[in-house]
Image (tube, rainbow, N blue to C red):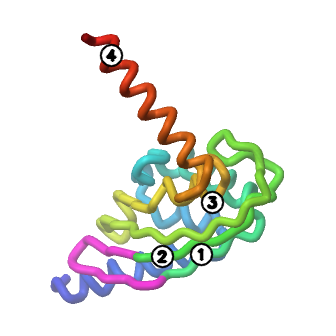
Amino acid sequence: MSATEQSSETGAIARAYFEAVAARDLDAMVSFYEPGGTGEIHGLVTLTAPDTYRVWFADLFAAFPNFRFEVLDVVAEGEKAAVRWRATGTFTGATRFEGMEPTGAKVDVTGCDLLTVRDGKIHRNEAYMNGAQMAQQLGALPSPGSLGERLTLAALNLKIRLARALRR
């Protein structure tokens, strides 16, 4: 297979995989991974196909019943594909997300995944998004510039000053 053909195939697999994510089709999503293929949403979770991968995304879809996903850009070169995306949803489902009870909060985040595709299957997915922004939208962290953020920073700075004073 030529490099151009490989890039084209990699890009097509990446698009098809993310179409399955948008459709919330767990069976199709898992079918794109080689057995034992891994994915990491940096700062959040590491997954292995099919088991932990299927469970984590089933919980995500249950926690955000109106989850929407769209691909913004795909760039493929050889066995790598970079996919920039946007996900939205409201945390009103019947299950927790990352241990947090549903808050009713709306989430709107963008991210980028770097997929490695080998022999027509996803071997590895490195996903990056702003986890702090998502936590703020969910209410797990205070919003930028809010009283809660100012109080949190004041408490942190007090802790740092106390630790320094104790070390002397």
Looking at marks 1 and 3 on the same chain, the residue that comes earlier in the sequence is marked by: 1
C-alpha gap between disc 1 and disc 3: 17 Å
Give the x, y percent position of residue 5: 24, 87
Give the tally of numbered discs: 4
Verify CB contact (< 8 Å) between mark 2 and mark 1. yes
Residue corresponding to mark 1: 69
Residue corresponding to mark 2: 85
| Residue type, mark 1 in image | Phe
Which secondary structure is most common in the magenta stretch? strand
- Does any portion of residue 110 appear in the rendered image? yes
As displayed, is residue 160 above or below residue 136?
Answer: above
Give the x, y percent position of residue 109: 54, 69
Instruction: Judge from the rendering whether residue 75 lies leftward or rightward of residue 40; answer left or right.
Output: left
**Element type at marker 3?**
helix
Front tag of 4 and 1: 4
Corner quadrant of residue 78: bottom left
Q: What span is colored magenta in the figure?
A: 72-83
Looking at marks 4 and 1 on the same chain, the residue that comes earlier in the sequence is marked by: 1
Residue corresponding to mark 3: 137
Crowd tier of the residue under label 4, counting other residues whose Cα lies within 10 Å: few below 14, some 14–19, many 20 or above:
few
Front tag of 2 and 3: 3
Give the x, y percent position of residue 43: 43, 47
C-alpha gap between disc 4 and disc 3: 36 Å
Give the x, y percent position of residue 158: 45, 28
Using the image, tell me which numbered label, if any, was put on residue 165: 4
C-alpha gap between disc 2 and disc 3: 18 Å
**Element type at marker 1?**
strand
Crowd tier of the residue under label 1, counting other residues whose Cα lies within 10 Å: few below 14, some 14–19, many 20 or above:
many
